[in-house]
Amino acid sequence: MVYHSSFVEEEGITKACGCPLLPLKSHIKGPAPVSEQDKTDIVDEAITFFRANVFFTNFDIKSPADKLLIYLTFYINVALKRLEGCRTLAVGTKAIINLGLEDIPVPGETGFPFPGLFSLPQSQDEADLFRNYLKQVREETSGRLLSVAYRANGTPNKWWLAFAKRKFMNVVLL
């Protein structure tokens, strides 16, 4: 059974491309509203559910937040593939920073991994808002992922990096 997002309430949440711009416990500047530090956010859910959800090839979407959970699960998979050969936290951090510097496509652009999952942007402003939100959520996910993918002494956590070999929903990023 796939784990779904607990963020099903859409009251007062801004949307871009059919995706809710959910609050984040983040210090990173961006369009996401700030969440309380003691509450679970979508990044926490994505990291918590990743090791179970990565085994599924089908994902039944029950709320718009599930779309973001799918995107983040895929992003964590891509990040783990980048970390796979990194033997220290310093090298892994460098690899994740380089991943963060790559262009972030939005729906309708070449390279977006899930065509049809999100609606196409209605304007350039909506595309920019969604791109900036994805950038912010990816940066926040990367930072938190490093804390679970590497132990406190800076060595890789094999129980996390082993999942780099999995393909999520049979999607491969070229």
Image (cartoon, rainbow, N blue to C red):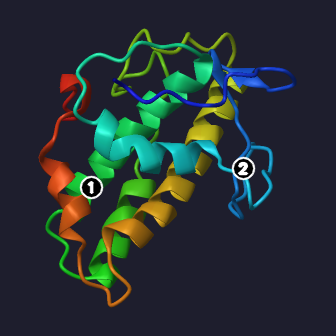
* Residue under the point 67% across and 22% down: 8
On the rendered structure, is 120 left or right of 32? Answer: left
Where residue 73 sits: x, y (%)? 38, 38
Looking at the image, is 46 positioned above or below residue 69? below
Looking at the picture, how far across and down is residue 27, in whole percent? 72, 64
Q: What element does badge 1 sit on?
A: helix
Q: Are marks 1 and 2 in contact (CB under 8 Å)?
A: no
Amino acid identity at mark 2: Gly
The disc placed on residue 80 is 1
Report, in whole angstroms, how far the alpha carbon at label 1 lies from the one at label 2.
Answer: 24 Å
Label 1 neighbour load within 10 Å: few <14, some 14-19, many 20+: many
- The one nearer the camera, 55 or 141, is 55
Q: Residue furthest right?
A: 12
Of discs 1 and 2, which sits in the foreground?
1
Residue at image coords 18%, 24%:
170
Q: Secondary structure at mark 2?
A: loop
**In-front residue for pair 133/84:** 84
| Residue linked to disc 2 | 30
Q: Is residue 19 above or below residue 149?
A: above
Q: Is residue 64 left or right of residue 142?
A: right
Inspect the image, locate mark 1, and give the three-letter code of the amino acid beneath it.
Answer: Leu
| 21 relative to 165 in the view: left or right | right
Q: Residue furthest bottom?
A: 153
Quadrant that contains the N terminus: top left
